[in-house]
Amino acid sequence: MCAIFGSFDTSMFEVLYEANKKRGNFASSIVSLTDDDLYIRKKKGNIDFDKYTYEPDANYYLGHVQAPTSAMRSWTYNTSHPFESLSWLVSHNGVLTNHKKLKQTYCNFLTNNIDTAVIVNLLEKFTQEEQQKGKLIVNTKNIIKKTLEMLTGTFALSMVFCDTNEIFIARSGSLLHYKNNGDYSTLGGEKFKELPEGVLMKLNTKTRRWNKVCKFKHDSPFSFI
């Protein structure tokens, strides 16, 4: 099991971390976003917020706690969430069933078989294809939709388009909840609503609300607890 969560508010972020960390304490991460930059911190085990210093200019925080779902148990930075490419950051809760086939077909250069690495590299592949066509502004909606519709199994995802620091969430099978103040969390609670499966949401940082971007075709064989 793993969990993803995020908030504008550091106090709420810590509340969400405490609520979700029961789903995994093998590794933890925090992504801090500013208007034009981002900072990633990953570590083995839990985060001690009494010793943690937030980035001074950050205005949104995304977290992940991990319980490995494979035989790999040695912690490394490159096998912990979020997974990175030139243009994307992705954190994932769930288990894909077709990631090995996708890796073989689209990103056989990957040196590991971690399913999240395939997701972020598919997003990057389709982004680069648009850029190679001379597009200065890529269509993130279409890139994400195309990627998600290739996945089978279960997933709840937070995705950051690093060129603009836009934040997206989506799920199929795996749990994910959101609030109309910009919070999201694997585990729900007061005022949280369950994110519908097959719906891509984007955070409006001005209104602090999640807005529906589009629907995507999805394969949800079971609810991944």
Image (cartoon, rainbow, N blue to C red):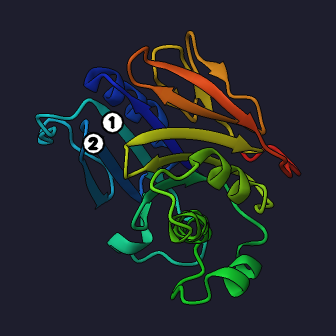
In the image, taking residue 152 as reference, residue 66 lies left or right, namely: left
Above or below, 92 relative to 5:
below
Q: Nearer the viewer, residue 82 or 207?
A: 207
Q: Where is residue 83 in the image (x, y as percent from the top left)?
A: 45, 63
Give the residue type at disc 2.
Ser
What's the residue at 78%, 71% (across, down)? Answer: 98
In the image, taking residue 7 as reference, residue 177 lies left or right, namely: right
Q: Which of 67 and 208 is in front in this view?
A: 208
**Disc ID at residue 149:** none
**Disc ID at residue 32:** 2
Q: How far apart are marks 1 and 2 (CA)?
A: 5 Å
What's the residue at 44%, 48% (across, down)? Answer: 64
Q: Give the quarter of the image for residue 172.
A: top right
**Disc ID at residue 61:** 1
Q: Nearer the viewer, residue 136 or 148?
A: 136
In the image, taking residue 48 as reference, residue 204 lies left or right, namely: right
What's the residue at 28%, 60% (across, down)? Answer: 43
Q: Where is residue 221 in the image (x, y as percent from the top left)?
A: 88, 51
Q: Give the quarter of the image for residue 34.
A: top left
Circles 1 and 2, Cβ within 8 Å, touching? The answer is yes
Look at the numbered disc 2 and give the secondary structure of its residue: strand
